[in-house]
Amino acid sequence: MNFITAKNKLKKLANGKYHSITYELNEYSNGKLETKCYLYIDPGISLKAPTWTEAFAKLEKYLPIIDLTEAPTEEEKKEDE
């Protein structure tokens, strides 16, 4: 899965809530590569894994537990201020 595909998948899963996606690549002096794929959905679902597939597998375990439709949207938060 590439970054754009992961971004689109996260947007759909976030159901209109604030979300963030980050990809980190570290290359060490011995040539070893390490990747970290970060996913975040407001309010407070944050996780990382070495691949997008693993990150989404972790995320999908949380989704049945947390009802994103009940969390306020960014617009609703601004209205409350």
Image (spheres, rainbow, N blue to C red):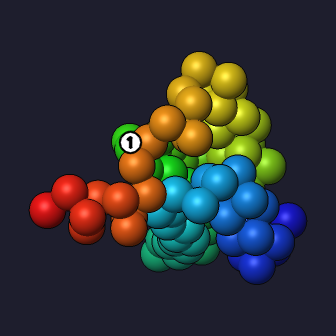
Residue 63 sits above or below residue 55 on the image: above
Q: Secondary structure at mark 1?
A: loop
Give the x, y percent position of residue 42.
43, 50
Residue at the outermost front position:
79
Dot 1 crowding, Cα within 10 Å, few <14, some 14–19, many 20+: few
Frontmost residue, 26 versus 19:
19
Frontmost residue, 36 versus 34:
36
Q: Which residue is mark 1?
A: 44
**Left-right relation of 38 to 72:** right
Give the x, y percent position of residue 26.
50, 71
* Residue drawn at the location 49% of the way across and 36% of the way down: 70
**Left-right relation of 57 to 30:** right
Residue 73 sits above or below residue 4 on the image: above
Residue 66 sits above or below residue 45 on the image: above
| Residue 79 visible in the displayed image | yes
Give the x, y percent position of residue 16.
59, 61
